Structure formats: structure tokens, C-alpha cells
Image: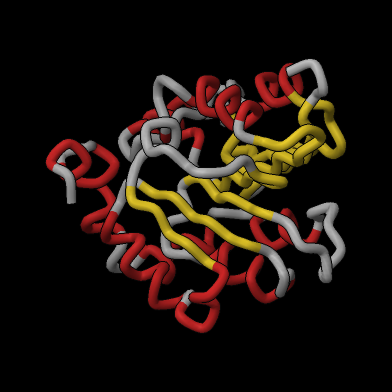
Amino acid sequence: MPPALNHHPLSKYYRFQSQFYDLTRWSFLFGRRLLIRSLPFHPKTRFRVLEVGCGTGKNLTAIARRFPHAQITGIDLSEDMLSICRKKLTPYNGRVTTVHGAFGEVKLRENFDLIIFSYCLTMVNPGGGRLIRLAAASLVPNGVIAAVDFHDSPLTSFQRHMHGHHVRLEAQLLPEFKDIFQTKEATVHKAYLGVWQWFSFIGERRNTY
């Protein structure tokens, strides 16, 4: 692992969290399955997809199953998370690539038809907006962006709690997506009777970008 990534706050955070990530995150990372089911691609389509912050590979595995002809790339800062991800994706090794590094700092050799952010951007503080703009530049014309993430909370105590886990809950991302991409779907949902909200977004790269 490169020294800079080894000492990155998120790499250090997930060194421990990776050990039980899949056992616990289902209880509050809502909307991931729905996002994949909502992707505007026919199951037999050949296309290139990138997931930024692919973690343990839950989404990449679901995409590989749903779209057997897709060429799939996942990038993540945490080698510990990627180690788990690679094991899950062993049956799909011929068409799945994992990259250890930061999106925008590691050179990817091609543009993509689809880029996915799943509970990643609220942890990039500051810089979430920069990554959204970078994603737009990394898509083919009329390429698709798909995102699901935390949105907001009316409880300052919960916001402070999440900040302790590197998550910013200030409704800062959805306006960025709507500004940069042509909106196809955008929804906001309540979790646990409104303790927090999460959003789902699917959009298309504007030709003028």
C-alpha cells in the first residue's frame, strides 16, 4: 500500500470497519439494491461501469450478476475493503477490475457508460462536489450517473455523531447532481421515522459538459 494511502483517514477508519462492514451496514445503507434495479440498461447490454468507493464489493457483485456482459471497474482507497471485494468477485474475474487509489488521482484508461457512487461522497469532506464534476468528465457523451447516499438530518446530535464517522449530513450533494446532470430520477426518503434522510439520483451527462 502506498504510504500516503496507508495514512489516509478513511484508509485507517476502514482498516477496523472492514472486519464487520457487511454484517452491520445493511441496517442503514438503504437504497443500494433499488438503485441497481433502476439502472437504465438492458441486462444484455455491453457497457463499461465504474463504482467509486466500491468497498467490499456488494454493489459490484450485484451488477455483475444483473449485467453479465458489463465490463466492471471498482476503485477504493482502502486495501482492506478491496481485499474482501476481490474474494467476492472471483467468479467474475474476467470482466471485473479493482483499483486501489483515489478517484481522480489514479489514471483510468477509458471513459465509462455508467459511474456509481454509493454512500461514498458524504465521506469526502471537502471534495464531494469535485468528484461529481470529475465523474461527469469521465463519462462518455450521454453517460449515466447513479448515486445513493445520506442526505440530511433534523437532529444536530445525529449530525455530530455521523461527523465522528466522517459523514457530512447537510443536504449538500443532491443540488450538485441536479446542477451538473440532466435528472432522470431523484428521490429523498426518510429513515427510522425521519432521524435522517437518504437520497437516490440517476442522471445523464449533459452534452455541453
Does 110 appear above or below 23?
Answer: above
Taking the spot 27% from the left edge, 60% from the top edge, the residue there is 80
From the viewer's perspective, is 88 left or right of 42? left
Residue 187's image quarter? Answer: top right
Task: Residue at 59%, 22% (x, y): give it.
Answer: 133
- Would you place residue 96 above or below residue 167 in this image? below
Q: Position of residue 50 (x, y in %)?
A: 58, 50
Residue 163 vs residue 48, the one in the foreground: 48
Residue 7: percent from left, percent from top: 15, 39
Residue 161 visible in the picture: no
Which residue is the extreme one toward the front? 109
Quadrant housing residue 41: bottom right
- The answer to whether residue 71 shows anywhere in this view is yes
User: Horizontally, is 37 left or right of 17 in the view?
Assistant: right
Quarter placement of the C terminus: top right
Q: Give the percent coordinates (x, y) of residue 39.
A: 79, 54
